Image: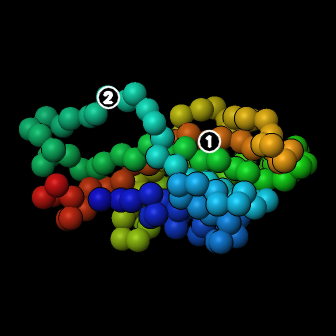
Amino acid sequence: MILLRDIRDYIASLCIAEDEHCFCGKLPDKKDKSIGIYNLRTGRQPTTSAGGDKNRSYKTKAISLLVHWNKNPTETEKAAIQLYNVLHNTRGANVNGHNIIFIQMLQEEPVSVDTDEKGVFEYVIECLFYIEKGKEDINE
C-alpha cells in the first residue's frame, strides 16, 4: 500500500522545492517555496477488475498538491507549471519500493487559488497516481 508519505518523498525527490519544504497533511508554518501533498477528496467510483481485486495489476491514489511559492505571481506560476510537467511526464518511477506506472493529471494545467492571508500566491494540481500492485497488496 502506498502512503501519502511515499508521494511526499517522490515530490521532494524532484527538487522543485527543498526536501524540508515538502509536507504531507498541513503546511506547518507556510514557508515560501513549499509544496503540500494531500489526499484528494474525490467522488471517484472505485474500479473493479473482472475476477476481483486479486486480478488487478495496479492501484490508484488521488492526490492534491498545493504549490505555495512566493509573492511573485509569475515565479509561482512557473514553479507550478514545472511540477505539473514533471508529474505529467512521469513513467515507471520507483518510490520507496512502489512502481508509479504513470500519473494522470485531472486538470489541463495548474489552477490558481489566488493568495493566502500573507499575500503568497498558490496553485493547486490534482492528479491520480497509478501504482503497480505490489506483493504486500495481494493480502489487502
**Against 57, is 1 above or below?**
below
- Residue under label 2, please give it: 45
Position of residue 93 in the picture relative to residue 16 (left or right): left
Secondary structure found at label 1 = strand
Observer-nearest residue: 39 or 9? 39
Q: Given the image, on which type of amino acid does mark 1 rest?
A: Ile
Residue 125 marker: 1
Q: Callout 1 environment at 10 Å: few (<14), some (14 to 19), or many (20+)?
A: many
Residue 6 appears at what percent x and percent y? 44, 64
Sequence-wise, the earlier of marks 1 and 2 is: 2
Residue drawn at point x = 70 percent, y = 60 percent? 29
Picture quadrant where residue 99 is located: bottom left
**Against 67, is 109 above or below?**
above
Residue 95 appears at what percent x and percent y? 44, 67
Q: Judge whether residue 68 can be spotted in this image.
A: yes
Position of residue 46 in the picture relative to residue 113 (left or right): left
Residue drawn at point x = 39 percent, y = 59 percent? 3
Residue drawn at point x = 29 percent, y = 59 percent? 1
Picture quadrant where residue 119 is located: top right
Residue 121 appears at what percent x and percent y? 81, 44
